[in-house]
Amino acid sequence: MGNLIYADNAATTQLDKDALEAMLPFLNQDFGNPSNKYSFAHFPRKAVEEARLIISNCINASPDEIFFTSGGTESDNWAIKGIALNTQNKGKQIITSSIEHHAILNSCSFLEQMGYKVTYLPVNHQGYISIDNLREVIDTNTSLVSLMLANNEIGTIQNIEELSKIAYDRRVLFHSDAVQAIGHIPIDVNNLGVDLLSASAHKFNGPKGVGFLYIRKGTEIINWSSGGKQENGRRAGTENVAGIFGMAVALKKNIDDMQKNITYVQKLSSVLLDKLSNSSIDFLLNGGKSRLPGNINISLKNRDGEAIMHLLDLKGIIVSTGSACSSGKTDISHVITSIGVPPDYAKGTIRISIGKENSINDVLAIANALISVTSYGSI
Ligand code: PLP
């Protein structure tokens, strides 16, 4: 990456070196199709099953509850549509929140067009969903509640244990999009009380284009694709062997080092925030007290987040924005709108997502660059 300071780890992360090493044999000499019965397919097949075991251990599930997919978007689509469209689950209401990723929101819009009712729970200023709100709207017509574990923009971590209890008491299935959380905070599907959970490898130093959906044993869900017998006949298609194995190696490594990484990334985040707080920049820190360790989402007063992003880019610093300019008007992200960031701050929203690969010098350079670009006055 040369002198680049990459601080957009919520968008994607750098592939772990051990994960890459582990993937190479399946991209080179061991390219056999795991579905074949001859000896040349043995190693790839063993790798897929070993990955399933490793991943299941990482989240306290059984191997036969892990289904490999092409990533978070597919896992979310499968969970939402797969439960709603299953005629066994007769309820026509889905409950979700206003701050979900578009993989959830657009799957819900698809169902609305088919006549399903979708209820979008609001969030408070920190991005928390109210347990009482969920209790009020859940009814006998509800087939699924889908609420994310950690938000991709503001990092707020929901109290999924308490929210899922409401669904459990009403015999309603519960899905959580854990794409941003897994590998970064501890996850135990039994403690969380979820029936389905989505994950994506590239958010935890695994390769892109691979993920998984955890489906609790006995959950009634339609098969995602029709074809061969892969993934127990539920998601047909030749497996991405290298991706699946690389994902397992990356996840295990992040989980083994989790406490160390959390402490380190939290320290970098607080150094950056302290530096900004001691500067003359007028900003609001978005998100809840319980937040992903590396997430810093700030809204700067009377500033343009997109312009700041480009100016930092020119200085070799990569962050993202919560607002985008299209056809002369600024679009504020649905998350920033939902948490009610005041209009004079909302347009100046940027997300800095620190990862374990960042250094103290990186965060000091980011703070200095932000102080410098905002001193121009007009952006
Ligand atoms: N869900 C959340 C919360 C995400 O942050 C993302 C990606 O940004 C996705 C789903 C989609 O994951 P993927 O990029 O693997 O399709």
Image: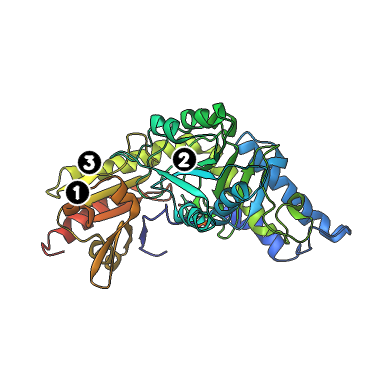
Instruction: Judge whether residue 222 can be spotted in this image.
Output: yes
Rounded to the nearest angstrom, the CA distance separating label 3 from label 1 is: 23 Å
Amino acid type of the residue tagged 3 in the rendering: Asp
| Residue under the image location 36 percent in, 37 percent down | 128
Instruction: Judge whether residue 16 can be spotted in this image.
Output: no
Q: Quadrant of the N terminus?
A: bottom left
Give neighbour class at mark 3: few <14, some 14-19, many 20+ (Cα, 10 Å): few
Q: Label 3 near label 2: C-beta < 8 Å?
A: no
Q: Label 1 near label 3: C-beta < 8 Å?
A: no
> Which element type, helix, strand or loop, lies under badge 2?
loop
Q: Which mark is residue 189?
A: none
Amino acid type of the residue tagged 1 in the rendering: Pro
Q: Quadrant of the C terminus?
A: bottom left
Q: Which residue is denoted by mark 3 in the rendering? A: 274
| Residue under the image location 76 percent in, 56 percent down | 44
In the rendered view, tell whether residue 299 sits above or below residue 175: below
Sequence-wise first label, 2 or 3: 2
Q: Label 2 near label 1: C-beta < 8 Å?
A: no
Q: Which mark is residue 149?
A: 2
Q: Nearer the viewer, mark 2 or mark 3?
A: 2
- Quarter of the rendering containing residue 134: top left
Q: Nearer the viewer, mark 1 or mark 2?
A: 1
Q: Nearer the viewer, mark 3 or mark 1?
A: 1
Rounded to the nearest angstrom, the CA distance separating label 2 from label 3 is: 27 Å
Q: Which residue is denoted by mark 1 in the rendering? A: 342
